[in-house]
Amino acid sequence: MKKKYIALFSIVVVSVTMFSLPIETKAAAQTIAEFEAEVNKYTSELQAKKDKIAKNDAEVAEIKKKIANIEVQIKQAEADIAALEQEIKKSESEIVAKKEESKKIMEYYQIANGDNAYLEYAFGSTSITDMIYRMSVVEQLTEYNDQVMKELKALIEKNKTQKETLANKKAELDTLKKSLQSEKERIDADTANVKVGMPKLEEQIKSAKQQISYLKGIGCGRTESVSACIYRVNQNSGQSLPSTNGFYRPMENGYVTGGYGGYGGHMGVDLSSSNKAIPIYPIADGLVTAKYLDRDGALVIKIRHNVNGTYIYSTYAHMRAWYVSVGQYVTSSTMLGLMGSTGNSTGPHLHLEITSCDWKSEGGGCTWKQYQKSTINPSRYVNFPSRWSNR
């Protein structure tokens, strides 16, 4: 009997502890002035990224001009090489022709008299004048032939040297072109990397501006705590949410598939069920403050809860359908929608987050970065056994 009382007492203590945990508020109270500072900061970061992209684009444009100029030079070098090859072939043909001509002249003088033809031709003169003339003819013929050969050979050597020079120039241009292409690819990759974070910055600026507009619209002071202002306004308007200490599991039956990892890790818990389209319910009474598709296409619902005068937010993601509207008051028994696998998901499940502020809801009181740090382990408020069959 004593053991049964001890067991019963333990259950009561666990239950009371679970529903009386203090609200965890990691994010400091925000003000309109702090939101404006965030807008300025994000705007500066966004402008810096735009300036970087503009600088990269200018560098890429200049590189493209250089590459285009190099390609023109490469084509010209290829054309010059082709022309030189034709000149070399022509010069070689002329050498062959000149050699053949010289050979015929020599043979003409040697037909009858063998190797002494030059001498016989020279000394067969009838006078001194005639002999000098004949010797001059022989000498000029030999010199002319030798000179032609030398000139043609020099031309061939010159053309070959020019061809090698042009070939080296073309190789240098090809190397320079590859280097510029590599630099262009590096800059393009840098630009792509810079662009990755821009949509989120733009979204943060838009969200912060919406928060400022909303807070000013309901009469919050520039340096007044957002949480205090919203609570004051809600109390005065009679629309404040009732306080609740009761938290429920968001589905009738299921199991945990992914635990809480905190800031820098998994910001909530992942829950699933054998029924892949099981209805999803709020973990407590509250006001629907946001309903949207995130960047990956996941259906998301956010609810604000009043716990003993302090607001917390619960987020339900990856749903396949939703049945509530923004501004609607819901109870823990209101069907929000159905579990699904929309967005960045590997299978049907519910991603549940609890935070002390929200960046997507009007008057949520924080930016995205602050929101990430404001996450609370859902297990502090909701009991998640390994498996359950009731809420």
Image (cartoon, rainbow, N blue to C red):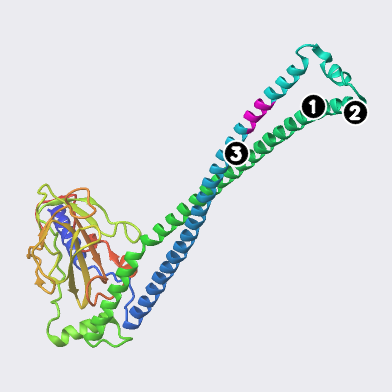
Query: Could you classify mark 3 by the number of other residues whose Cα lies within 10 Å: few (under 14), some (14-19), or many (20 or more)?
Result: some
Of the pair 285 and 176, the residue shown nearer to us = 176
Extreme-front residue of the structure: 126
Q: Residue at x 38, y 79 (%)?
A: 37
Disc 3: which residue: 84
Of the pair 89 and 68, the residue shown nearer to us = 89
Identify the secondary structure beneath mark 2: helix
Magenta stretch: residue 96 in it? yes
Identify the secondary structure beneath mark 1: helix
Q: Is residue 41 above or below residue 136?
A: below
Q: Position of residue 169 (x, y in %)?
A: 60, 45
Using the rendered view, name the quadrant where residue 42 is placed.
bottom left
Q: Is residue 268 left or right of residue 11?
A: right
Disc 1: which residue: 142
Query: Could you classify mark 1 by the number of other residues whose Cα lies within 10 Å: few (under 14), some (14-19), or many (20 or more)?
Result: some
Q: Is residue 104 left or right of residue 375?
A: right
- Whichever of labels 3 and 1 marks the residue nearer the N terminus, that label is 3
| Three-letter code, disc 2 | Thr
Alpha-carbon distance for marks 3 and 1? Answer: 30 Å
Q: Residue at x 24, y 67 (%)?
A: 21
Disc 2: which residue: 129
| Region in magenta | 91-98
Q: Position of residue 133 (x, y in %)?
A: 86, 28
Q: Is residue 311 above or below residue 167?
A: below
Magenta stretch: residue 260 in it? no
| Three-letter code, disc 1 | Thr
- Whichever of labels 3 and 2 marks the residue nearer the N terminus, that label is 3
